[in-house]
Image (cartoon, rainbow, N blue to C red):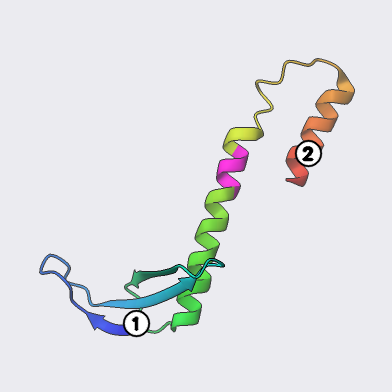
Amino acid sequence: MARGVTSWTQCTVPLTVVVSREIDTGGEVNDWELATTSATRGAVHTRSTYALRTATEERHRQYKCFCDVLRMASRKFSMVVTQVLFVLLA
């Protein structure tokens, strides 16, 4: 973790950068960085906050792609109730 990073002149706010390394099951190593303007949070907190972002994006994708109640063709009450319940449970 590096605090107070000023990597380019157009960025006038000092950044905190967290460098992460992930090793997959095949042994491939991937290094990646997260940059934030928060100078008070630690590396673990920054990573866990980023995990919330990916979970939120996946929930949005699921809702957008698979939970379209308006395009449902069935008019049968039991099918409509089932679709609504599945959407609520998701």
Q: Which mark is residue 90?
A: none
Give the residue number, with chain letter if any, for mark 2.
86
Residue type for callout 1: Ala
Q: Residues within 10 Å of mark 1 (few under 14, many from 20)?
A: few
Question: Circle 1 — which element?
Answer: loop
Residue ID at (57%, 67%): 25
- Of all residues, the one furthest to the right in this rendering is 78
Q: Residues in magenta?
A: 59-63
The residue at which mark 1 appears reads as 39
Numbered marks: total = 2
Determine whether, in the image, residue 72 is placed left or right of residue 18.
right
Is residue 77 depicted above or below 41 in this figure? above
Q: CA distance from mark 2 to mark 1?
A: 42 Å
Instruction: Indicate the position of residue 35 as horizontal and vertical percent values.
Output: 33, 70
Name the residue located 71 percent from the left edge and 21 percent from the top edge.
72
Number of residues whose C-alpha sits closer than 10 Å to that of mark 2, classed few (under 14), some (14–19) or many (20 or more): few
Task: Give the quadrant of the C terminus.
Answer: top right
